[in-house]
Amino acid sequence: MLTQYFTASSLDGFIAAEPEDGLAWLLTRDIDMSGPQGYEEFFADVGALCMGATTYQWLLDHHDGPWPYEIPAWVFTHRRFPPADGDVTFTAGPVPEIHAAMVDAAAGKNVWVVGGGELAGQFCDHGLLDEVWIQYAPLTLGSGAPLLPRRVEFEEVALDRNGEFTCRRLRVKR
């Protein structure tokens, strides 16, 4: 079981553009979801996930249809949201406590820290982040939400090309 941060980034290290944490830059890019280090390969081993309030709000605003995940999800937030239509738990609890609940719910599968970068950083601060999967798009944003606003040392696990993206799988060095 691993705790992994799987995300896309601009070359200058931003996961969402200003204003309003936009992802339009990402959604127009060519990537094969079943290709090297693609979403399908990654998600097949995920048993639980978490995200911050900004990521959750983006999903609410931009995803048509029912909640897209059939696995347990936690949203770290101090905001109030309407009841979710899936297995979603809203929490302001401590990361280590919620991580333990996520590991139990994942039943031997991996835990996905969806985003943002600050939430992934909090997992890393507690020694709970094992890997980072980054799909780098061939563009710069100049500003926005940072990929991982911490100093973290990594070991390369894999490096691939998928469509327009350079994909890196990195292990956190302890």
Image (cartoon, grey):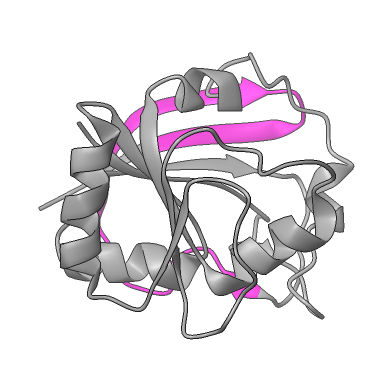
Give left or right: position of 12 versus 100. Answer: right
Q: Which residue is drawn at 62% across and 73% down?
A: 145
Image position of 5 with respect to 36: above or below: below
Q: Residue at x 71, y 45 (%)?
A: 137
Instruction: Tell me if residue 163 is in the magenta stretch.
Output: yes
Give left or right: position of 8 versus 30. Answer: left
The secondary structure making up most of the magenta span is strand
The location of residue 50, given as percent across then percent down, is: 43, 54
- Assign the N terminus to one quadrant of the image: top left
Image position of 2 with respect to 114: above or below: above
Front residue (pair 28, 66)? 66
Q: How many numbered discs?
A: 0
Q: Which residue is drawn at 81% across and 62% down?
A: 61
Image position of 163 with respect to 169: above or below: above
Q: In which quarter of the image is residue 162?
A: top right
The location of residue 43, given as percent across then percent down, is: 49, 27
Residue placed furthest toward the left: 174
Image position of 77 with respect to 171: above or below: below
The location of residue 126, given as percent across then percent down, is: 16, 67
Instruction: Tell me if residue 67 is in the magenta stretch.
Output: no
Q: Which residue is drawn at 57% across and 20% down?
A: 40
Q: Quadrant of residue 66?
A: top right
The location of residue 121, given as percent across then percent down, is: 34, 68
The magenta region covers: 145-169
